[in-house]
Image (cartoon, rainbow, N blue to C red):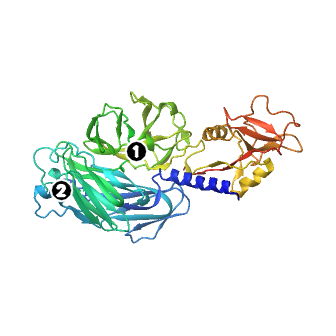
Amino acid sequence: MSPAPRLVVLLLAARIAASQTFTDAGKDFRVIFPENIAYYHPLDAQNKIWVTALYDDTSVTMSPASSEPKQLNAGRTISFDVTQELGKLAINEAKVSDLFTVFNISDKTVRITSTKDIVIQAVSSRGRSVQSALVIPTTKLSSKYFVPPVPETEGATSGGDPMVNVTERAPFRLIIVNPDEPKASVTIKGREEIPISIEPGKAAQIWVRNDSTTQYVEADKGVAVYFSHPCAVQRQCTCGLLHAVLPPAKNTTMRFPIPPFLGKPASIMQSDDSTRGWVNSSSPLVKSAGTAIVYWPRLLLTLVPVEEFASCFMVQFIEDKKNVLIIVVHKDHKQGIHVGNDPLEGAGWQELQGTDYVSTNHSISSTTVVWHTSANMTVYHMVQQNNTWFGNPAPVVSANPDFRGCVLTPEVTMILHEAGSWQESIRSCEDQNLSLISLPSEALQKQTCRNLRGNDAKQVWIGTRRSSLTGDWYWLNRNGFNDTNWARSEPGDVSEGQCAVMSLEGDCGWKDRNCCEDARPLCYADPQLLQII
């Protein structure tokens, strides 16, 4: 293999690895369930972990657990009931002035591992106090997180000083999880610096100050950070769990579109290096390098920035409840969205005024995949229990849009550096474990042309030629030769050329050429798609 093709392969591997970092899939997760008090409800909390496999023959293990590993095929989901829950903070006789230096360390965490990629959601329910969370794989955790401002709730942020022995009057808290080896050195920074050391597999809890000072968590390794209150006052003297996974701090400022949230008013909690405060829900978009979280009296929902939109999402249906998708997409890409195998039709799109984005709500009745054929979007999964909504961003499976479905492993489209004849190009592609590209459908032709924009090659060999017996054109992969994209006045008669090149200019038209001419080969491998059930 020549040096140039080897370099192309390395670059391709890097591109695939980079695309996988934008998903919520992984093989190793550390799950926690926050204290869910709702003390007026006599039953214990019901904690569940929902695990969905993306590939066949996936083995899933929960630790600690007494059962054998569970076996799953692609698109299948299992749930684990979990009794481990982070207990109350060991406050002892701490003074209010000392609250923000008092920690509790707990080993009540659960580890989920698998042989192949999975996605995970966790749900904690106690009476009407229900919250869900998207669990991030340990390999995709970060070392810096901004802390959002504290919501205005009765008792915790109003009505006098916090009271550690009265649940509703206690401050909000951070939960910081060290998922694995080695020990984590963590510092809470803001008005002062508070250091803490967290052993592998343990979770630390600390109160959050209610002031305007920018606060953030910084660690020497990847950790998970949650913002939580076990029983925030809601209305009519009731309280319930508020819980949100904090997103990592960003390297740059990002844009967060705000969909009309099920027709009801909400506020946006925002925090980064320069801002820590609130944005009115009438704003259609906020910008931040940190957090942007929707706050309702009963819900915290982390918003997704445009720069992290994706193309395919797995949505786990919650039985016996109303399940609603909130979809946000660029206004030019309302077409192409699918829910399962069916195109999204009849959507009542609402413009986010002053932006290029629109949103819609869509009810579902079963676990499904939501995907886009040609663009990226974001999806929130909202669930209604009685008059209470809970939810989270839907787990991202892929950030690679494709007209065929939800991509697990992206297609490979690669122009090799060295030019050769059509016959030599077949062999050059095979040396890369690829094939000279066949383009039997209009959708694949358009997607390939779009993906190759800006390439320095002018034209490339593609995998079609005339039959020596009949003179008819055929594809190397033996698919039907029906949808064609010949350039004007092409192809000529049989004497003018037996093979074909594709132009990388304009609409990527084809031209017949002598098979012995030199051109660079366009090599290809199909994507691996998630089976939609």
Task: Give the x, y percent position of residue 334.
Answer: 50, 33
The disc at residue 416 is none
Q: Can the viewer see residue 264?
A: yes
**Could you tell me if the residues under marks 1 and 2 are in contact, i.e. CB atoms within 8 Å?**
no
Count all numbered tags in the image, as a single digit. Answer: 2
Which of pointers 1 and 2 lies earlier in the amino acid sequence? 2
The amino acid at mark 2 is: Phe
The amino acid at mark 1 is: His
Q: Taking 154 as reference, is 417 left or right?
A: right
What residue appears at the point 39 percent right and 27 percent down from the top-left corner? 354
Q: Is residue 184 above or below residue 515?
A: below
Task: Give the x, y percent position of residue 431.
Answer: 72, 57
What residue appears at the point 22 percent right and 63 percent down from the top-left corner? 104
Q: Is residue 200 above or below residue 14?
A: below
Q: Secondary structure at mark 2?
A: helix
Q: Which residue is mark 1?
A: 381
The disc at residue 100 is 2
Q: Nearer the viewer, mark 1 or mark 2?
A: 2
Q: Taking 371 as reference, is 219 left or right?
A: left
Task: Give the x, y percent position of residue 304.
Answer: 40, 43
Q: Nearer the viewer, residue 150 or 77?
A: 150
Q: Can the viewer see residue 384?
A: no
